[in-house]
Each structure stands twice: as C-alpha cells, then as structure tokens.
Image (cartoon, rainbow, N blue to C red):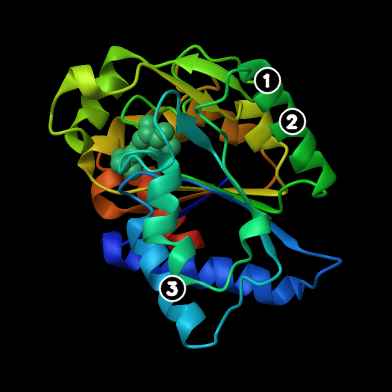
Amino acid sequence: MRVVIKEDKQMVAEWAAQYVAYKINHFRPNAKKPFVLGLPTGSTPLGMYAELIKLNNDGKVSFEHVVTFNMDEYIGLEPTHPQSYHYFMFENFFNHIDIQRKNIHILDGMTKDYAKECRNYELAIKEAGGIHLFIGGVGEDGHIAFNEPFSSLESRTRVKTLTESTIKANSRFFDGDLSKVPTMALTVGIGTIMDAEEVLILATGANKAQALKHGIEEGISHVWTISALQRHPHGIVLCDKAATSELSRETVSYFLDIEKNNF
Ligand code: GLP
C-alpha cells in the first residue's frame, strides 16, 4: 500500500486531480477503449472535482471517453433531491466537464427492485471491462462507499442499512436533522472496489485519523472496512497531515521519505 501525505486538503485535491488526469491521459482512451473510473461523493472529494474541472476547461484532460461508476446512492431520494448523490455528482462535477451522459452510471435509489439494480450494476462494470481506477473517501468509522463496519470484505453491490454513526455524520447535509437522513443505501461492495486495477482513497482532517490508523497500521478486519486495501496490489491512501495524527511517528516518516520523489 502507498500512503501519500500532503500538507493540507488543497494539496490533496491537487495531487488527486493531477493523478487522475495523468492516468486518463496515459491510457489514451477512445470510443472503443474508454477509461473506466469509479467515483465517490462526500465533502472530501469536492476539491479534487474542482481541480479536475479546471484541468478539463484548460484542455489538460478530456472525459469524452471516460466511463464512470459511482460508489453509492441513498435509497428513497429522487435524483433531483439536493442531497442525492445523483444531484451531487451533476452539480459538482458532471455538468462542468465534457463527459457523455451515456457514460455515467449511478445506482438508482428509487428502483423498486434493489436486487436487480445491484446485479445490473455489477454486470455493467464487467461489460465496461472493469474499473481502472476506483476513487473513494472514508467514513470516520473506516467505511468505504457505504460498506459499514462488519461488511463482508468480499461483498458485492447490494443494499446496506446505515449505522447510527454514519447517519449522524451525514446529517450535517440534511440541516442537522437525523430524521431526514435516509437509513438505507445501495452501495458497491468491498469486493467490487477491490476488483479495480487501482484504488485511491482520500482522507482529510483529524476526524479521519482513527480510520487511517486502523486501515494502515492494524490488521485486516471487517470492523474497519478500509483495511481491505492492505490486500490490494495497487492501493493508495492520499491524506493530509491532520489525518495522520493517530499514526505512529515511524509510519509517517517512512511514507514521507519513501514517497518524496514519487508522483
Ligand atoms: C458517506 C459516503 C462515503 C464517504 C463518507 C465520508 O458515508 N457514502 O462514500 O466516503 O460519507 O464523507 P466525507 O468525505 O464527507 O467525510
């Protein structure tokens, strides 16, 4: 696992955007050979999306032949609901770049048949040839996408009931009103994420420090689902200094040293 530590969240955003652009450009995607990107929501990736929009508008990267799969979506929110992940993605990213609408995939939280929706999502990823780069955030309790503690590390796309801690954390987007936060979501599984060629997890702020400690320094465990990344051949945690505050000094200086000349 690589751990890339940057000074602050703006530098995390810039590094992430440069990395995504580099990966897309290096791949030289075309209509027959699109680059397949897994994408997260949440406050953490907002800076990266803003930087990617700039790079796109400046002609440094194109999303014309990029196919995207979002990680998750709340059950019961219309795509037009300002807190739905559909709305988030169009508002903060897709509306501002040259992506083709047909290349965007987001789970349908309004479906009547969850099992079918999840099955089809897995199939669509397979048909696209698999995900080249899956980007994720992490919850305070170490969850990636909506794979809450005790999710199977082999899990696939499915329905998840959200934990009280996630509902509480996400209530800040729902006027602080816990009763407005959906209690269930559709989410890709840990197995789905781990199938990607490369996984990049973004973490900023001291509230993510416990998750990084368990994910990086402790054993692989379904209690902290981020720890599954330890078994991925190309896993990267990209974080700011604040998020490393629970890591040992040795771990931090090891990664600062080994990554100093790397992209
Ligand atoms: C939600 C999302 C996760 C995200 C997490 C952290 O639970 N389903 O994908 O990583 O929130 O969000 P934030 O980046 O706002 O801390």
Q: Is residue 169 visible?
A: yes
According to the picture, the residue beneath numbered tag 1 turns out to be 154
Secondary structure at numbered mark 3: helix
Crowding near pointer 2: few (<14 within 10 Å), some, many (20+)?
some
Furthest toward the right, the residue is 32
Crowding near pointer 3: few (<14 within 10 Å), some, many (20+)?
many
Of labels 1 and 3, earlier in sequence is 3
The quadrant of the image that shows the C terminus is bottom right
- Residue visible at 44% across and 62% down in the picture: 93
Judge left or right: residue 221 versus residue 192: left
Q: Nearer the viewer, mark 1 or mark 2?
A: 2
Where does residue 162 sit, x and y in percent of width and height? Answer: 39, 17
Please name whichever residue, 69 or 138, is drawn nearer the observer in this view of the structure.
69
According to the picture, the residue beneath numbered tag 2 turns out to be 120
Secondary structure at numbered mark 1: loop
According to the picture, the residue beneath numbered tag 3 turns out to be 53
Amino acid marked by disc 1: Glu
- Residue visible at 81% across and 40% down in the picture: 126
